[in-house]
Image: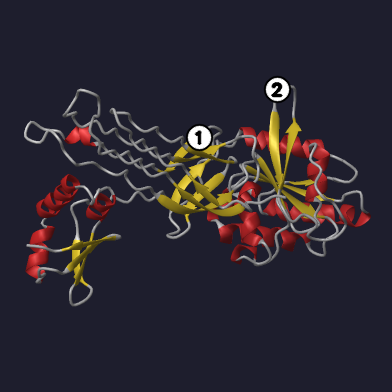
Amino acid sequence: MFIDQAEIFVRSGNGGNGMVHFHREKFVSRGGPDGGDGGKGGDVIIEVRSTMNTLSEYRHKMRYLAQDGKGGGPNNMSGKNAEDLIIPVPPGTVLFDAITGELVGDMTDPGQRLLVCKGGRGGRGNQHFATARNQAPRTGEKGEPCEEKQLRLELKLIADIGIIGVPNAGKSTLLSALTNAKPKIAAYPFTTLEPNLGVARIDDETTVVLADIPGLIEGASQGAGLGHDFLRHIQRTRVLIHLLDGLSEDPLADFSQINGELSLFDPNLSLKPQIVALNKMDQAEAAELFPQLKTELKKRGYELLPVSAMARTDIRELLFKAVNKLSSTPVLADMEMPLPVYRPKDDSKQFEVTREGSNEWRVSGAGIERSAKMTYFEHSGSLRRFQKLMEILGIETALREAGIKDGDTVMVGDHELEWQD
């Protein structure tokens, strides 16, 4: 089943904890600190795989968690770094932050990679905190916390030529006649409920990719039917074959309606080169209509070609016409999209002190909360290091000015500390 939208939760790995440990060996009464460092947590990386053409893999599995780094060991042994988590996506996948709607990345080239969540660094063991004055430090670091994101994935097919038109115009029949694609075909509207891709061979060295875009109806640009789902796939095509239904009551009105919907959805779509063809020319009604319709379209600057996808009449000429237009069309520039938003990282020195009760205070701030998560509060050295950090950042001064008293509770992230002057 063709799935072109998905939403997944991704999380990198936590860094491994550094170890607080002292060397133990026979006949060595005072071994120095030898706590090893923790390993780095795994990154979450999105990678383009040319062998994929749908997002169906993410229909059932929606959570992707990288592994945590391993903790450090004694004898200065560092913990093992976790392997990165690689999430494959098909070419043409656009990534958005599902919470903010901001663009995260546009994945088009096979092998392209994008780091979306960075793994936490490993915490340092107490071997790093030894000094001439403190040769037995009971100080270490826990691993840095992970990052997480809720991502929305949208697939926009990458094709050289897109085949558009009203429902039942014969787009799927034309695609199957030009390529080896085997789309579902029947004599009623909306047979095609998902885009189909096919590869047409021009000569021994040249092939082009064609996409049969399901029929568009009036109001598609506002989401009528499955309008947005279908129109999105036209954005990456370079040339359009606009197939008119020779048995329609008013093919000229159909032509205007489709172009109007394209322009309303994305003004750039109306600028794409179009090869216009009247299908079902094996029927007398279409053959009778052709001369008048050709004259009307010529006034609008379009040449009308007669074809019959069912009888396979003149379809190669139509394809060659589109390929010639393709060769004179510049490589598709990136479509109009919101640019990726790179927000500056939170200032690690910024904090906020708020009162949450008569004897309770909360300290908020990216830097201090991250430090709290990386602190061994059960080790005196690590606790003193955290207290020193609060003093350097000015948090102690801010708490005193706010009116904190002995015995009050100070909350930093998930940790509760008792205030003592």
Residue 34 or residue 147, whichever sits in front: 34
The structure residue drawn at horizontal position 32% and vertical position 38%, both measured from the top left corner, is 122
Q: Which mark is residue 373?
A: none
Residue 166 or residue 103, whichever sits in front: 103
Rendering coords of residue 267 (x, y %)? 54, 55
Query: SS of the residue at dot 2?
Result: loop
Q: Which mark is residue 112?
A: 1
| Image quarter hosting the C terminus | bottom left
Residue 199 or residue 130, whichever sits in front: 130
The structure residue drawn at horizontal position 83% and vertical position 53%, both measured from the top left corner, is 290
Rendering coords of residue 63 (x, y %)? 53, 51
Q: Nearer the viewer, mark 2 or mark 1?
A: 1
Q: Which amino acid lies under the numbered mark 1 shown in the image of this protein?
A: Gln
Q: Is residue 270 visible?
A: no
> Number of marks in the image?
2
Q: Which mark is residue 205?
A: 2
Q: Residue furthest front?
A: 27
Other-residue count near label 1 (Cα within 10 Å), few / some / many at <14 / 14–19 / ≥20 = some
Left or right of residue 396, residue 225 in this image: right
Left or right of residue 96, residue 2 in this image: right
Rendering coords of residue 261 (x, y %)? 63, 61
The structure residue drawn at horizontal position 17% and vertical position 28%, both measured from the top left corner, is 29
